[in-house]
């Protein structure tokens, strides 16, 4: 499966499952960053977001490994994000 196909498969599965995210992007090293915006955390953490992403990918039959998670916090009115970086195994 080529890199473009992987990104499309991930995006399609998330949309089918009503798994809301803001952006899926592929990095130069072949990992994928999946971001979700937040205004209030509502109990969510970056590591919780990462676990949720991996769970959804595995349910879709996509073997993935969580590389790292990050909270990209910005002062209002800018948007803050939870980010999960994943590696898709062949």
Image (spheres, grey):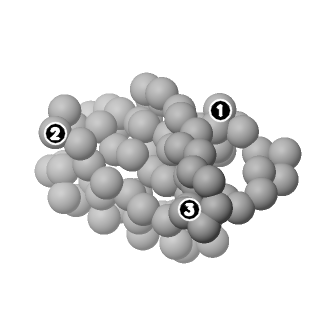
Quadrant of the image containing the C terminus: top left
Q: Which residue is mark 2?
A: 28
> What is the crowding at mark 3: few (fewer than 14 residues within 10 Å), some, or many (at least 20)?
few
Q: Is residue 63 visible?
A: no
**Image side of residue 59 versus residue 42, left or right:** left
Tell me the crowding category of disc 2: few under 14, some 14 to 19, or many 20 or more residues within 10 angstroms, Cα based. few
Task: Say if mark 1 contacts mark 2, CB within 8 Å.
Answer: no
Kindly identify which numbered label has been placed on residue 79.
Answer: 3
Q: Secondary structure at mark 3?
A: loop
Left-right relation of 53 to 43:
left
**What is the x, y in percent for residue 17?**
61, 68
Q: Is residue 43 left or right of residue 2?
A: right
Nearer the observer, 20 or 8:
20
Is mark 2 in CB contact (under 8 Å) with mark 3?
no
Whole-number angstrom distance, CA of label 1 to CA of label 2: 23 Å
The picture places residue 11, in percent across and down from the top left corner, at 41, 64
Residue 6 image point, x, y percent = 28, 53
Q: CA distance from mark 2 to mark 3?
A: 24 Å
Q: Secondary structure at mark 1?
A: helix
> For the point 35% across and 33% down, which residue is it?
87
Residue at point 19%, 58% (across, down): 4
Q: Quadrant of residue 79?
A: bottom right
> Which is in the foreground here, disc 1 or disc 3?
3
Residue 65's disc number = none
Q: Which mark is residue 47?
A: 1
> At 72% across and 39% down in the image, what residue appears?
45
């Amino acid at each position: 499966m080529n890199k473009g196909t992987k990104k499309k498969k991930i995006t399609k599965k998330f949309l089918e499952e009503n798994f809301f995210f803001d952006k899926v992007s592929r990095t130069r090293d072949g990992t994928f960053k999946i971001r979700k915006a937040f205004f209030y955390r509502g109990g969510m953490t970056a590591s919780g977001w990462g676990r949720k992403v991996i769970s959804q990918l595995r349910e879709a039959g996509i073997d993935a490994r969580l590389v790292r998670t990050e909270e990209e916090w910005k002062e209002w009115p800018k948007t803050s994000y939870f980010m999960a970086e994943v590696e898709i195994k062949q």
